[in-house]
Amino acid sequence: MPRKMQWIWRSLIAIFVSSLIIAMTIALQPTQAAIAPLPDPYLTSGKFAEGEKVFRDYLQTNLKDDKARFGLGVIQFMRGIERLMQSLYRYGMIQTPLRGSVPFLRLPVPKNPQPQTLTYDGLQQVFQAWIDDLATVRNTLDPIQDRDFKLALRFGLIRLDFDGNGKSTDDEMLWQIFNAITGANVTEKDAQQFLIAFDRGDALWLQGYTHVLGAIGEFLRAYDSRELFEACAHLFFQRVDTPHKFLMTTRRESPDEYSYSYSPFDLFDLVSAVHLTKFPLAEPQRMKTILNHLKSVVSLSRKSWQSILAETDNDREWIPNPKQVSVIPQARVTDAMVKAWFRSLDEIEAILTAKKNLPFWRDEKLSINFPRIFNDPRPFDLVSWVQGTAATPYLEKGTVTNMNVWNEMFRAFGGNLFNYVVWFN
């Protein structure tokens, strides 16, 4: 072999051997695992955007860390609530007693001294942003499979930037929101001691709640409520784009940001609101999405409770099984409650799949095919539904839901049925 070729071959062999030695050296060196971030520092400081980025970066190389995945889901959920509150603040939501009857308007948004004018399309964008935020949380939580993860959070100490000024103050903590919504008297000391150890059952619970809230949001987007907005939105917001300008000039302003001055015209506005709850169908495909949300709620609730019942520990439970204690004072779960809940889930599933119908209050021989309301949607008319004529396209003779199931629910939960339903999801 020519001397030049020998030199080339020797060089190639030397390079190969050197590369192999370097690779083996790297492989034999102990690897340092990435340290999993904790959500608490980002939640209690209100740095949701920063926390979301940190967790997303970490999960790119640690896909199976379901504890971190749940932490990211919680951060995203709280960031969605914060964005919703900031939108309502931007448009000057009024603290009126009427807001408790409208989804998404119960949040304790402070009074904005310089609100923007709210248009109908602007409000629809707020609803859509909330729907999108819920979908983000849902997609984050969906891959979770670890049955043994646990994440302890001081939920009441989470801070939110209510007004979007870039600061999360002591007045903008979650326990303050809880007091404002429920009328409770929780103190900061109570919030500091309120430590919840979230687990697999709670991850399924939160995922289910994104479907509950998503269904409400989709309903608000499915119908055209522009006429109602133009006639009654002034009851909830300081500045509204409406052709009825006199509605804004005759409204009374309250000097206190958390009180409301009643106007003698409020009664007329409320009557008008009932009359105008008659919406043309704008986006019918959203109605099928609502039905799918409802089916997912039932499925996830069943999975959540199966996970909760399989737990053998008793560690700061959010939703306990009958052998555990909840972190919520005086909140007990009994075997009778769980049994009634599972029976109700089976019954709801039968209704959502048209195996059973809802009773019709005008004629006991007829019943309502509930899923057909979503698969064959029509314009929504509140008064016609109360009267019964809006149900006509969905009436048929069929098997009606077993009323014994619902009577069992009342017996098991008593006068607290509604609160337990909201809690159990």
Image (cartoon, rainbow, N blue to C red):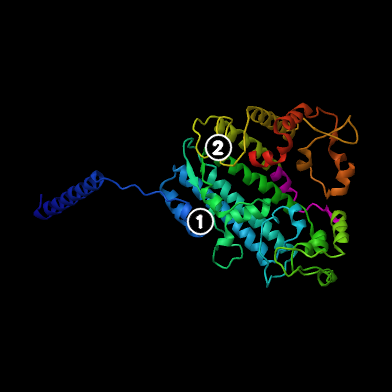
Mark 2, residues whose alpha carbon is within 10 Å: few (<14), some, or many (≥20)? many
The secondary element bearing badge 1 is classed as helix
The answer to if 55 sits in the magenta stretch is no
Looking at the rendered structure, the kind of residue marked 2 is Gly
What x and y, as percent, mark residue 212? 67, 45
Q: Amino acid at mark 1?
A: Thr
| Farthest residue, direction left | 3
Q: Would residue 58 appear left or right of 415 to someone viewing this image?
A: left
Front-most of 36 and 413? 413
Measured from the top left, where is residue 276 in percent x and y? 85, 56
Q: Which residues are drawn in magenta? A: 276-290
Viewport quadrant of the C terminus = top right
Residue drawn at x 59%, y 43% is 207
Which mark is drawn over residue 44? 1
Residue 131 in view in this figure? no
Residue 98 visible, this orientation: yes
Q: CA distance from mark 2 to mark 1?
A: 23 Å
Residue closest to the eye, 114 or 27: 114
Left or right: 333 with respect to 58?
A: right
Disc number placed over residue 201 in the picture, else none: 2
